[in-house]
Image (cartoon, rainbow, N blue to C red):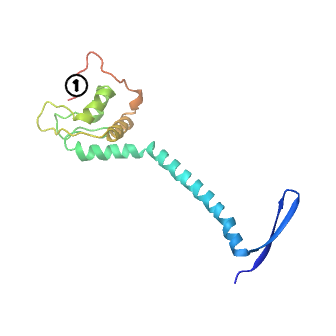
Amino acid sequence: MHSLTLVSWRCGKRKVTRPRQAQARQHKMKWPCDLISLFWISLLVSGANATAANSPTSEIDGRMLLQKHCSRCHSIDATGKSPLEQAPPLREVYLKYPIEQLEYGFAEGMGSKHREMPQIQFSSEQVSAILNYLGSITGVDPSARPRGPTPSETQPP
């Protein structure tokens, strides 16, 4: 059985006192606090997700994409030769060509002089992750790279 308590409040100049059940009052008082806590937790979680999008995980995703699709022929590391002698290390491709050409090449499928190279098309998020990874291993951020081609440059291999 619920116990009754007297609840008092002021309504203008007059003090009002009414009996109320204690458990019902506690539940009503706790609910707004739960709602506020839920609101702050959801803000923290959404903020963590936004931070995660800008964190080094995109570099890990870029490396994993290159490992899966390109490492059979190209070196995807900061040093070392490519497994296939004719395939340039991707760090060199990254440094040689403007970002705009690389974005287009990864999104539409890189052109190549040899038939064995598959034409892989990446989404814009994947292209961004790949370029961020290549920027991290070369020490040159993609945003610091030239966007358009210079007259002496050709299409990526």
**Is the N terminus in the top left, top right, bottom left or bottom right quadrant?**
bottom right
User: In which quadrant of the rendered view does residue 29 lie?
Assistant: bottom right
Residue 23 spot, x, y in % from top left:
69, 75
The residue positioned farthest toward the bottom in the image shown: 1
> Image height check: is 46 above or below 150?
below
User: In which quadrant of the rendered view does residue 54 lie?
Assistant: top left
The residue positioned farthest toward the top in the image shown: 151
Residue 109 spot, x, y in % from top left:
22, 35
Judging by the rendered image, the residue that carries numbered circle 1 is 155
Decide if residue 140 is in sight here: no
Q: Please name the residue shown 37% across and 37% down the image.
A: 132
Q: Please name the residue shown 30% across and 32% down the image.
A: 103
Side (left or right) of 108 relative to 144:
left
How busy is the neighbourhood of tag 1: few (under 14 within 10 Å), some, or many (20 plus)? few
Decide if residue 124 is in sight here: yes
Q: Amino acid at mark 1?
A: Gln
Side (left or right) of 10 relative to 97:
right
Side (left or right) of 114 relative to 34:
left
User: In which quadrant of the rendered view does residue 12 lie?
Assistant: bottom right
Q: Please name the residue shown 73% across and 75% down the image.
A: 22
Question: 43 or 139: which is nearer to us?
Answer: 43
> Image height check: is 131 above or below 26?
above
